[in-house]
Image (tube, rainbow, N blue to C red):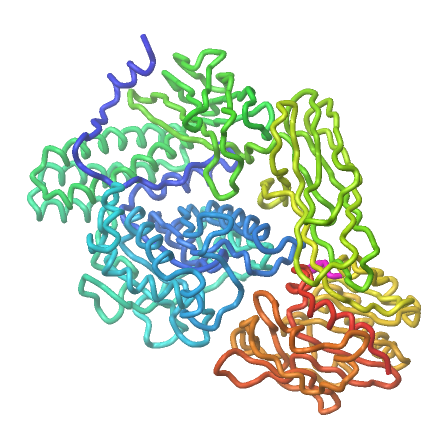
Amino acid sequence: MDVSESMDKKSPIVQPTKLPCPPIHVSVRTMQGEHGLLDLWKAIKPLATIASAMNTGAHPDDEHSAMLAYLALGRGVYTTSVIATRGEGGQNEIGCEQGTALGIIRTRELEEASSLSNVTLGILSEELDDPIHDFGFSKCANETFRKWGEEVVYERLIRKIRELRPDVVIACFENEPTTHGHHRAITLLTQRAFHEAADPDIFPAHMQAGLLPWQMKKLYLPIMDNDDYHVAVPVGEYDQIYGSSYVQLGERSRFMHKTQGMGVHYDEGPTYNYYRLDESVTPAPEKERDFFFGLPVSFADLAQNVAAKGGQELAKVLHLMHDAATDVLNAYPRFAEVAQRVHRMKALLASAQQEVYKSTLDEETKIDLMYRFGIKEAQLNRASAEALSLVVKIKPETGEWVAGQTTTVTVTAYNGGALEVEHVQLRLRVPKGWTAKPLTPTAFPRLAYNQTVCTVFEVAIPAQAEPFHPYKPPVLDVEVLYFAFDTASTIRVEPDSRVAVLPPYAVTLTPSDVVRNTLHTDEAIPVKVTLKQYRPGSSTAKIALVVPEGWTAEPAFVDVPFSFRSETKTIAFTVHTTPQVTNGKYEIRAMVAGTDGVTEVAQDVQVIEYPHVGRTYFIRPATLTVQAFDLAIPKNQRIGYVSSGFDNMDKYLRAVGVNCLNLDANEIQSGDLSRYDTIILGIRAYGFRRELIESNQRLLQYVENGGNLVVQYHKPEDKWKPHLAPYPIFIGESLIDWRVTNEQSDVRMLAPDHSMFLEPNVITQADWDGWVQERSIYNPSRWGSEYTELIATSDPGEPEFRGIFLTAHYGKGTYTYSSLAWFREIPQLVPGAFRLFVNMISQKQ
């Protein structure tokens, strides 16, 4: 008998044909069988709960991790987290990726954090260049709306609400002046959406796409511990199964946000998160037991509501489901008994679905029930696989593919449980236009304990296949159908590592950007072109550079032969500019042609890989940006750079001809510092270079003896103390108050005759143009009178900051502290930032 036919006959689930229902969103996951009892508990805990909650925020790491862990892991609530941006504008504490590359990492961190807490994730930003992006710190919601497009982000938020249909929504932040503008914007839109998501006249195209209006029942805002709260969430409760409190469980997920330095080790003990009820469509007392007071939480609550509307027969089934869910939880940790009771509950769920269609309930109630049942069906399928210890793996021949390629993918299903699984079918799901041809059987009559079944698929990737996109779902997953206890189950499983369609040749231009010093136009620009072949077998690629008009590249092109996949070769080109290059930005592009003779814009593939997020890819055009401007650099300087690991400005200084050497701990602690004309401390260096605190007196002695010490911005928590400077500097401690977020803010030079603005480059007002993201961060709030205040600037309508750029003589030398955002400007080749930074490191007594 055909297995698919058998499944159709034996399955008690009757699928509706006319009743509209929004899409069901339950996370697809890998099934690796790594955590045994904990994975089983995480799978069955939600079965008794029909309530849902959503947390809305602006950035990865905004989520209320302890509260989410309490709801999802502790209460079994279907919990979702909706985040606006990918975090592109944040800082990176584990590497040098910035901008889009950082956003890709932070997305993966958020995905892993959500998975740890059983949270379904939604992100409003959809593309690599999406208008909803983290453009850096913002002090107000209006600026955020201008840059995002208020209706763009609002439409996507409403769409997520209609897709996920939460009963309760909890915003991550209050809308108050001391809060990041991105946070305020999302809270404002969440408040606005509370009623409008239920209005069919708001974004009616959603209804044409199959979504339906949805009325959230309650909206909560977070508050501090005071008498104004309505709900106190006991996140300090200890869960013996997890061996942790919910605060500790939440922090396990927060430790995934490593780029932001998140995660704290908390001791056990009573702890609460406090929330104020902002909106409600149901009456609420002054103090509530929890978010769901007055709302149905269990199948018994649902049965009571259904019976009140005339659905007595359905109510009877729902009461049985309530008892069945209790039985499942009571059977824990006995895997076989849990599996049996899960499948009994699956059969009852099928009966409940049938009763919905037979009932005289109104359509809105039917739709709501079927949506909740759909979530429960997906959860039961997961619980079945966990209880049966069914381990499914996807094993591609390689995880890096090219369009037009044919490859193989092996799918295995292993039974680690005591119960035999029947009528197993393995299906590999691929995008439209692809083919997945099974080379071995896909259906297996039975799968006994400690046995594995295996299917090999031949996958043909079309020539026009879309390249890998880090924000899109995986290009393939596996659907496993099977029977246990005469009941059908289906699970979907994703690969445990990224499978990517990549260009046939990855082309990287080094450097990726370069300063063309117009004071030295006779110098050629050396360009190293690295090609990596991703296509299998041998081939020849023709590579050439496209340069601005009047420029030349030598050689004109190069034929590069390859013998095997992943082979890498490097070619040297030399680019000559015209004798007179005007200040401005220019671009050099690479073109590549393969064995088919088609010439295309070459693509660079940046491989991004960290242990906590695995491997992913960033595909972009292979280009080299040339920023031309005049830059005077003193000769015979020796510069020492102390990097914290969070910036790569030393690389850019070397690229423009500065003799910049990186200093290690030994050099700082015991080396001869007098060998250096200038020593630069990278951003936040005191917080991450332990030897600096111990050796600070040596650094001050270096200045006193005639050295030039440049210190870049620090956070107050970076072990910064006012006495680390020769004269005290106090850093402002408010996140929002002590920064200038407008990169176009007017700058006044308070000491225009100071050598900082005259040597070796004459700084004019034009040098403050073209800055990116922000002017300054973590500005000093107080400082000694010995310092010269060099500039003043502020955000519109705010008092000027005069401590952003401070310099002072100390003994025979010079000490400069600057909270200007050099780490953003220099990598973006901002001319004025380069010119001023060179002046800063060229100061003499």
Residue range of the region highlighted in magenta in the rendering? 645-649
**Which residue occupies 22% across, 44% down?**
299
**Which residue occupies 24% across, 47% down?**
298
**Residue 348, position in %: x, y?**
22, 32
Residue 646 in magenta?
yes
**Which residue occupies 74% across, 48% down?**
551
**Residue 460, position in %: x, y?**
50, 20
Picture quarter with the C terminus: bottom right
Q: In this view, does 259 lie to the left or right of 79?
A: right
- The answer to whether residue 551 is seen in the rendering is yes
**Residue 674, position in %: x, y?**
92, 72
What is the chief secondary structure element of the magenta stretch? Answer: loop
Q: Which quadrant would residue 719 be assigned to in this image? A: bottom right
Residue closer to the observer: 561 or 298: 561
Number of marks in picture? 0
When the figure is inspected, residue 677 is found, relative to residue 326, above or below; the finding is: below
**Residue 162, position in %: x, y?**
28, 49
Residue closer to the observer: 336 or 97: 97
When the figure is inspected, residue 738 is found, relative to residue 356, above or below; the finding is: below
